[in-house]
Image (cartoon, rainbow, N blue to C red):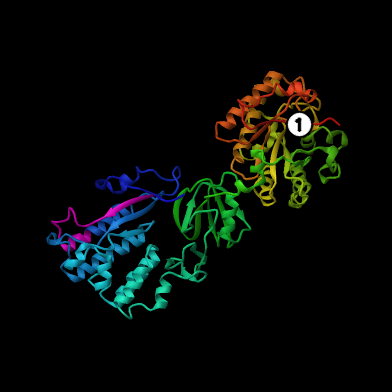
Amino acid sequence: MCILLVTPFLSEQDADHLYGMIGAPQYVNVWNEIHAYFIWGYADKTELQILAEIDNYDKTHLKAAPTNNRLFLGEWCMGGPPDQTGIFQNLDNFRELGRKQLAYYNADITGGWAFWTWRHSDETIKRTGWSMRYLIRSGAPLLILSKDALNELVVTMALASRRVLAALATIAVSAFPGVLSSTEIAEACAAAGQPCGNAQVGPNCCPSGQYCQPWNPSYYQCRPTFPQCGTPEVGIDYRGSDLIDVTGLILPEDCCSRCSSTAGCVAFTFLNIGWDGRPHCYLKTGTGTRTSVSGAISAVVTSSTASNHIQAKIRSGAVKSRAVNLGGWLVSEYWLSWDSSLWTGVPTDTAWRGEYNVMKFLGKTKGTAAFEKHRQTWITEADIKEIAATGVLNTVRVPVGHWIIRDATTSPGTEGSMFAPGGLKYLDTLINMWAVKYNLAVIISLHAHQGSQNGYEHSAPVTIGSVGWSTSQTNIDNSLKFATFLAARYKNSPAFLGLALMNEPIPPVDRTVLQNYYIQAYKQIRATGNMCILLVTPFLSEQDADHLYGMIGAPQYVNVWNEIHAPT
């Protein structure tokens, strides 16, 4: 994820043409490069007129530049056109030439700058506009005519540009003894673990592999960068593109880690002191609009934990899945969870008819509260930790119902409006947090389809025993949305292994409709580049070798597994 710098034509390096360059959010880590010279085309200008041109350049070019990309000034110098010698004759004007450029470039060039050039043949004839080495060594008229001015140049470059080389400070000291002490030079680039700035002066440079982290407005500290994310941008908020606001994380490296293990997260912004005085970790689907916010820390994820997770090994075939089902959690089943508080006050004759009928009995308000309490307590992080600790189990299979996606999107049909909302956040937590933390793969089983594929309790039918899934195109469309939404949501999660596209279908489900659903779900999911495992199953009454031969599979269909349930 190196930085890529793009530049318009040399004759078109203005704000209007910068808006036409490639950039965020579609293109990540792209900077716009421009060059600023007040030499060519200025031969008819006086020294004072050129100084005025610098003011105009900042207003019309720098401050007006687009903010989606960082702006980098790839070349600038202290040369000037008076008498076409490239040298300002008036010493005060020459100082002002340097002061104005540094002030504007440090304030408005978001990506930093590079002086042209370190060494130039003009040194041999005592010309002073092009060679940074000569300007520093000779004490020629720049900001460095005095000790204080030289200090201002070196420290300003370190604090504002953050691109100064330690060699510049070293050369300055050797050329002018007493200009900067060794301690002052060290302060220009802070040492590891040491203070490196504050909100007023901004972040200072830090050693390689470290960055200047804000703790509060008064104290910034050099701390290690994050192995899973790019170089942090201090003072920058990736405004917009929010995926989720995570509280409870107190360090930006934890925010990076959370983003790298969260489906759909490609960047983050961390605030040590948020709107409520607490740390906030904002996970992002993109870099949004880069906005200056004091104390903000933002970075793009460069690697995730996916390659080392057990899920990747299972998906590749290197390891076999050894799973346990999380039954009765996100799809209720009375027969296996009868001791849950969910069933308090629910007649047994209603409880075993499935979640639709339980919600119909309880009503939306009471039912939502009851299911929320059940989901909070039936499966917890402690269960996932215990599963992982067996040393045998490496996967969990979690049943879900079609209504779960309505927490974040719409779906065809009306059945979903009956159910208790709020289940999706538990699925998010399982896949993006617990399963990543404890190195377990996750299979999502689409247990309950609108219209019901088997009439059983776990399919949450409107009428127990009624099978109507394949009789309605709306139901089929609902199932496709059900499958594609979840596949997309968890596509980038390290723990997400795949989807079981339907659980235990039975006649009178139409066999052809079922097969076509599998094919369409496969095509729509694969069209997004998602190569998760897709599990397909024949009728519950036909789970034998002969009927498995009729299922979709290799080589035409990739990463498809056949699922069967052993009779008991």
Closer to the camera, 317 or 135?
317
Q: In the figure, is residue 95 to the left or right of 554? A: left
Closer to the camera, 99 or 404?
99
How crowded is the residue under tag 1: few (<14 C-alpha within 10 Å), some, or many (20+)? many
Above or below for 212 versus 365: below
Residue 507 highlighted magenta (yes or no): no
Residue at image location 67% in from the left, 35% down from the top: 499
Q: Position of residue 369 (x, y in %)?
A: 75, 45
Q: Residue furthest front?
A: 318
Closer to the camera, 441 or 43?
441
Which picture quadrant has residue 87?
Answer: bottom left
Above or below for 124 versus 343: below
Q: Label 1 belongs to which residue?
A: 459
Q: Amino acid at mark 1?
A: Ser
Q: In the figure, is residue 98 to the left or right of 398? A: left
Magenta span of residues: 31-52
Determine if residue 152 is in view: yes
Above or below for 100 versus 34: below
Q: Position of residue 187 (x, y in %)?
A: 43, 73
Quarter of the figure that contains the C terminus = top right
Closer to the camera, 541 or 13?
541
Q: In the figure, is residue 294 to the left or right of 138? A: right
Q: Position of residue 229 (x, y in %)?
A: 52, 53
Q: Position of residue 475 (x, y in %)?
A: 67, 25
Determine if residue 422 is in view: no
Residue at image location 36% in from the left, 53% down from the top: 71
Query: At numbered mark 1, what does the secondary structure look like: helix, strand or loop?
Result: helix
